[in-house]
Each structure stands twice: as C-alpha cells, then as structure tokens.
Amino acid sequence: MRRSVLTTPALLVALSVALTACGGGGEKAAETPAETPAGETAAPTVVAGLDGKAEYLICQTCHQENGEGLPNLYPPLAGSDLLTGDPSIPIAIILHGMQGEVEVKGQKYNNVMAPWASLTDAQIAAILTYERSSWGNAASAVTAAEVTTVRSATASRTSPWTVAEVTSATLK
Ligand code: HEC
C-alpha cells in the first residue's frame, strides 16, 4: 500500500501542475474584490432596519420617554430648536457632547452631556430620525451618510460643545 503511493511520481507531478494552474487563476479572481471597496456606501440602507425608538432607550434615561427631559437637569427634545434645525447640529452634539448654559423652551439648563461617539453612524441616524419626528417634532429624516460627514468634519474636536460653538462651527 505504502509503496504504491510512493511510486507514483507522475501523479504527484500532475497534482502540482494542477495546483499551480489553480493558483494562477486564483490571483486574477482576487484582484476583483480588492478594486471595489464599496463597504461604507451600504450604510444608509441599514438605517431603515434599525428601530430608532429602541435605539433611543440610551437617551431616554435623561431626556425621558416623552422627550420632555427633567426640569433643571436635562433639556426637552420635544420642541427643541437645536434638534429640529440643521441635522448637523444634533449629530455634532451626539458625537462630542454638550456643556454650558442653554435655554430651551424658556427654561435654562447648565449641565454636561457626555459624547456618544461609540454609536455607529446608522444608529445615530436612526435615533435622530425618531427624535425629529416624535412628540410633535416634524423635522426631516437623517441619513447615516450625513452622520459620516459630520464625524469626519469634526474629528479633531476633543471636548463637549457650548451652544455658541456648535452653532458657529464648520460641521460638514
Ligand atoms: C446622562 C444624561 C444624558 C443622556 C444619556 C443624553 N443626554 Fe442629551 N443632553 C443632556 C444634557 C445635560 C444636555 C444639556 C447640556 C447643557 O446644559 O449644555 C443635553 C442636550 C442635548 C441636546 C440639545 C438640546 C437643546 O435644545 O439644547 C440634544 C439634541 C441631545 N441632548 C440629544 C441626545 C441624544 C440623541 C441622546 C442619546 C444618544 C442623548 N442626548 C443622551 C443629557 C443627556
């Protein structure tokens, strides 16, 4: 048995030729996927699959289920001008946080919101789309691509924004 295997050099040559041929063909095939780095462009379609209301649970601890916040501590998101205006502003607030005095619906707040940069672009888009269309808010949906743009435009930011900063900064 053992001898018959060792005495078939012709078969081994044939095998190695076949393997070499496969390797040659494989190289060509491998070039194709390397030339199409389309991974990131698929993100916007994922947003629809994410439930913004479920994702909002992490914000709800402070801003409350009804979006009204808590007096003197957490500002309301229902009726917030910063939330429902240019989406770049709430995107930037989620990515880097917010601090200092702010007046929302006639009430003053002076607290700190920590950054949530670890959320994905799609999660942030889903959360903002939910918040901007809930509790009487009627602002446009937000796409993951918009979040991607603000994330890269504000990448050098290292501290939470004041209102004056976030409303005057270049966010996209
Ligand atoms: C631990 C509490 C806390 C959590 C959790 C939190 N926030 Fe905040 N948020 C705050 C505080 C405090 C402020 C106001 C900061 C200040 O006084 O300058 C704020 C401000 C905001 C504002 C600006 C509102 C305005 O009109 O000025 C937005 C928008 C916002 N938060 C969105 C979110 C979103 C979206 C999430 C979830 C990803 C979230 N927050 C999670 C505490 C929180």
Image (tube, rainbow, N blue to C red):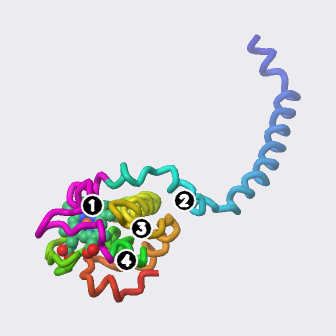
Magenta-tinted stretch? 57-81
Q: Label 2: which residue?
A: 43
- CA–CA distance in space, label 1 to label 4: 18 Å
Is mark 2 in CB contact (under 8 Å) with mark 4?
A: no
Please tell me whether mark 2 or mark 3 is closer to you in this view. 3
- CA–CA distance in space, label 2 to label 3: 24 Å
Q: Secondary structure at mark 1?
A: loop
- CA–CA distance in space, label 4 to label 3: 16 Å
Is mark 1 in CB contact (under 8 Å) with mark 4?
A: no
Question: Which class describes the residues within 10 Å of circle 2: few (<14), some (14-19), or many (20+)?
Answer: some
Q: Label 3: which residue?
A: 138
Amino acid under label 4?
Answer: Ile
Please tell me whether mark 4 or mark 3 is closer to you in this view. 3
- CA–CA distance in space, label 3 to label 1: 14 Å
Mark closer to the chain start, 3 or 1: 1
Residue 31 in picture, x, y percent from top left: 74, 57
Residue 42 in picture, x, y percent from top left: 59, 58
Q: Label 1: which residue?
A: 67
Q: Label 4: which residue?
A: 89
Residue 121 in picture, x, y percent from top left: 45, 62
Question: Which class describes the residues within 10 Å of circle 3: few (<14), some (14-19), or many (20+)?
Answer: some
Does the magenta segment cover residue 111? Answer: no
Ligand 1's image quarter is bottom left
Please tell me whether mark 1 or mark 4 is closer to you in this view. 1
Query: Above or below — where is 115 with respect to 58?
Result: below
Would the CB of label 4 be found within 8 Å of ligand 1?
yes
Residue lying at 37% horizontally and 77% vertically, measured from the top left: 89
